[in-house]
Amino acid sequence: MGEATTEDWIELRLGNRRDWAEQLATFVFDGWEADFDAGQYVTLAKPIDGSLIQRHYSIASRPGDPLELYLTIVPEGALTPYLFAMEPGDHLLCWPGPRGKFTLDKVPDARDLWLVGTGTGLAPFLSMLRDGKVWQRFEHVVLVHSVRFGEDLGYRAEIEEMAEKSAGRLRYVPATSREGSDGAIEGRITVALDDGRLEAMAGLSLTATESQVMLCGNPAMLEDMKTRLESRGMLIHRKFRPGCVHMEKYW
């Protein structure tokens, strides 16, 4: 956290917000014009009780567009309650540069790219799809978005429109673990992978020879998926040991 000094930080202004559900919202800020790669994150901060509270948030916007963040509130959290209390015109601090290496340039070439996210772990994948560079390297992209309830499937209409315009190259697989939802897999995506529903809905197989997989979100999901993918010979990608799996934990 550190001392409450704002030197070297810049000030952002909340331009607008969209509330998808009671604890889920999109925030669009003015004032941040840094170059970044899709998949990176930004650091926000606020002086609170003599300390500068800092937290990292993945960027959902396309590079060059206003900074867009897709967030869920953590009621006991240090910063998100303040963010969710913000209204357009309110200000907070931001580190001037982007951070993070969860980017496409770290991913080896393959025929298919699987983007698997839980909750707001959708954000970096949304940035990648909006950016469009993904189509220069992969024939197919499967976006798997796992949430608890149907109302938590933020950006669903936008993603479905992308898929419709992609001529079959983008496969969208929504999943809800706590209730059924039209057009979505019901239950955990790890179970859907085990019983074949995940690949059936995508119309593609997850294989070490044809697929690269990016996982983002709940650490429990990441570990469970990692175990299942390892059983298929799909290992974590390392600098000196190329693999198929790339992960970004959200807490």
Image (tube, grey):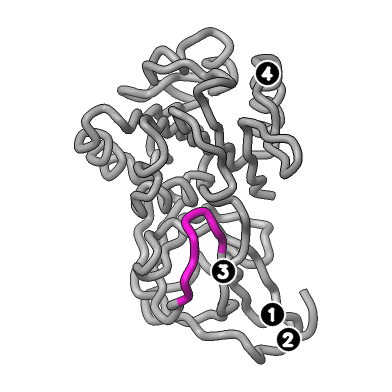
- Amino acid at dot 2: Ala
- Residue 142 on image: x %, y %: 41, 30
| Mark 3: secondary structure | loop
* Residue 155 among magenta residues: no
Question: Is residue 231 found left or right of 63 in the rendered image?
Answer: right
Residue occupied by mark 1 = 48
Q: Would you name the residue on which mark 3 appears?
A: 98
The amino acid sitting under disc 4 is: Gly
71, 178: nearer the viewer? 71
Spot occupied by residue 105 in the image (x, y as percentages of width and height): 54, 50
Image location of residue 174, percent across then percent down: 40, 29
Tag nearer the camera, 2 or 4: 4
Q: Amino acid at mark 3?
A: Pro
Q: Quadrant of the N terminus?
A: bottom right
Give the number of the mark in front: 4 or 1: 4
Q: Are marks 2 and 1 in contact (CB under 8 Å)?
A: yes
Q: Residue at x 39, y 27 (%)?
A: 173
Residue 35 covered by magenta stretch: yes
Neighbor class of circle 2 (other Cα within 10 Å; few <14, some 14-19, many 20+) is: some
Label 4 to label 3: alpha-carbon separation: 33 Å
Residue for badge 4: 233
**Mark 2, residue position:** 4
